[in-house]
Image (cartoon, rainbow, N blue to C red):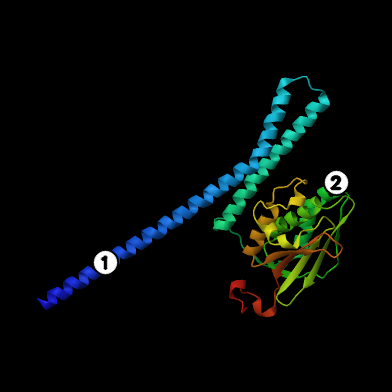
Amino acid sequence: PAILSDMAEKRESKLVSRLSHILNRTSLNETHALKERDQVTSLLSDLSHQLKTPLSNIVMYTELLSEGGLSTEEQKSFLSETRRQSEKMQWLMKSMLKASQLEQGILSFSAGYTAIKPTIGKAVSSVYARAAKKDIHIEMEEFPDRRLYHNPKWTVEALGNILDNAIKYSPAGSAVTIRLLPLELYTRIEIEDQGMGISPAHYNDIFKRFYREEQASQTEGNGLGLYLSQLILNKENGYITAAAGRDGGACFQIFLLNEVESSKGLHPSRLPF
């Protein structure tokens, strides 16, 4: 009887343990599902808010065009503005989806130690037309090329967003300067403008999704470019900070890992620091 009792207790203990495991797993799945639901809800809410203005503008311009009685120049102007607002909506949806996928790990990319100078050059090329339109000169201080840990394609997008931000908030005829400063573990890439600058109290806020400083509200923007740049750089084991420029304006500092002799062939996650 004692042996049978022990066996029954063991069976009961195993059943309780298994049931507990099932309940815990169910609880975790439910928590994960609720988290995903909240993320989707937040994404839809943000998209709805951001798309409201361009969509309203498209409806207004379309109604004006359909009523007729407009001159040829007015028609061209409204068509051009409708196209611009449509492109803005398309960019917003594409960028929001990309940011969300990067956050959740759905979208990933590989990185390695490769030359940074061509990457910076492509980023400058991507914003050259916008800079020329405002007569803004992009100056790149001379530096010897370095192999830094990054994905060229994605880093071009990250740097392009930062350069675009500098051009957007800088006055016509000013300059945006790019310089490279080697450090012990990282290399710091600085992008400095001569614009309105950023309040020190908001140096961290500007990298939040859709955040925009009050003083920048008069300039068209959506507060998504810097947020996306930060996500990309974090995926490369890098990071970005903001500071005051030397002559006013803002200075964005991008940090990417150096290639050192002991790190060749190693992934940054395995490096001894």
- Give the residue at x 71% y 22%: 66
Image quarter in which the N terminus is found: bottom left
Q: Can residue 57 be seen in this snapshot?
A: yes
- Give the residue at x 67% y 67%: 238
Q: Which residue is mark 1?
A: 16
Calculate the distance from the C-alpha at mark 2 to the C-alpha at mark 1. 71 Å
Q: Which residue is mark 2?
A: 133
| Viewer-side residue, 86 vs 266 | 86
Task: Give the residue type at disc 1.
Answer: Val
| Viewer-side residue, 171 vs 119 | 171
Task: Give the residue type at disc 2.
Answer: Lys
Measured as percent of width and height from the top left, residue 247 is found at 87, 63
Helix, strand or loop at label 1? It is helix
- Give the residue at x 61% y 77%: 271
Image quarter in which the C terminus is found: bottom right
- Label 2 vs 1, first from the N-terminus: 1
